[in-house]
Image: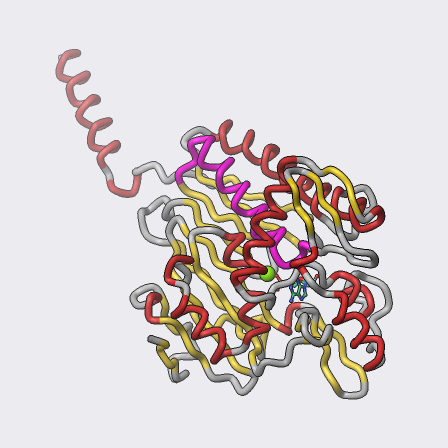
Amino acid sequence: MRRLFLWALSLLICALLLLPGCERQPEPVEFTTFAMDTVMNFTLYGEKKQTADAVKSLLTGEVSALEGILSATQESSEIARLNRRGTGGVSAETAGVLAKALELCEVTGGALDITAYPAVKAWGFTGEARRVPSPAELEALAAKIDYTAVKLEGETVTLLEGMEMDLGAVAKGYAGDVLAETVRANEIASALLDLGQSTILAVGAKPDGKPWRIGVVDPAQPGRYFAVVELEDMAMGASGGYQRYFEEDGVVYWHILDPDTAAPARSGLASVTVVAPSALLCDGLSTALFVMGLEEGAQFWRDHPELAFEAVFVTEAGEVFRTAGLEGRFSLAEGYEELEVTVLE
Ligand code: AMP
Ligand code: MG
């Protein structure tokens, strides 16, 4: 009788364990941190909760350390010190970021230019009162923007007189790549790292094996997404006038400057979203393509298959263009089904 009871009990336990609803769903570790002037949201799925918890403190530490060396506005950062002194040694990490950023300035023909900082400051985008510099002031500022004059020799950097650097267009992307590496090194196979202002990295797929679905902001209504891009082990970065701007006398001035004029880039675009394995590339290219505009940006995409990126362009008139390589990964969001999307080949 007792044996029969034990047999029935074990049968019951097995049946319960096999119930589909009883399958263990991993619990995410979710947290938010404020760094690099924005709110960052992280979602990690770890095998063991301790791992994800430990990675949480690692990531918040890493992102604030990177900000501490790369920020142009933090007095104590390596970049701020260089901007004050004009020359000096930097850490291997900063030298590495500078080398990568300068490479992107070069490949984009100077649409990205990390020496735009005096102009960024003149417009007040670093936090001081926003203002519109005079045409003469802009001309003088534009004449000083020239990444080719930045000398990087090993870990020593030298700038021209009056030149100052700003890694604002690439630092968040670089941080994203570093954090994703930390996540992977800690055996977390699934994570979403949202570094704010549309810089986002997907580590692996979602725990259910499906790709992460990331919204593309509608620049005309930044609280809404007009499209969804599916990402798996991939990064996405967007740049747009809607992210930081001010209005004066009915004119909108945004934070992405054309290095040729030192004024907000008016290329006819409202936003550019870039999808690529590296968040640094997404960040740098989205800024650069915004400066280039649709025609030049599309040609840049055709001319640089080695960069392995895809892009979504939205014009100020609200037209949407996406590159062919997003086929199967791009769809229109609810409420935007009627939107016409032109595929760039
Ligand atoms: P993002 O938000 O990544 O598009 O980068 C814009 C930020 O980079 C601005 O807030 C400026 O600090 C800086 N910036 C503006 N225009 C440029 C440019 N053409 N090249 C490099 N950095 C820029
Ligand atoms: Mg950028």
Which quadrant, please, contains the N terminus? Answer: top left
Is 245 placed left or right of 104 in the picture?
right
Is 305 placed left or right of 260 in the picture?
left
Q: Which is more toward the observer, 24 or 97?
A: 97
Q: Is residue 202 above or below residue 123?
A: above
Residue at horizontal 44%, vertical 68%?
Answer: 311
Q: Quadrant of residue 288?
A: bottom right
Q: Is residue 28 magenta?
A: no
Q: Quadrant of residue 327?
A: bottom left
Q: Position of residue 16 (x, y in %)?
A: 25, 33
Total numbered labels: 0
Q: Tell me how the rendering is colored.
A: secondary structure
For the question of whether residue 195 can be seen, the reply is no
Q: Is residue 174 magenta?
A: yes
Which quadrant, please, contains the C terminus? Answer: bottom left
Residue range of the region highlighted in magenta in the rendering? 167-189
Residue at horizontal 47%, vertical 30%?
Answer: 186
For the question of whether residue 152 can be seen, the reply is yes
Q: Which is more toward the observer, 20 or 177?
A: 177
* Ligand 1 placement by image quarter: bottom right
Q: Is residue 14 above or below residue 104?
A: above
Q: Position of residue 2 (x, y in %)?
A: 17, 11
Q: Main secondary structure of the magenta part?
A: helix
Residue at horizontal 35%, vertical 66%?
Answer: 326
Q: Is residue 135 above or below residue 201?
A: below
Q: Position of residue 310 (x, y in %)?
A: 41, 64
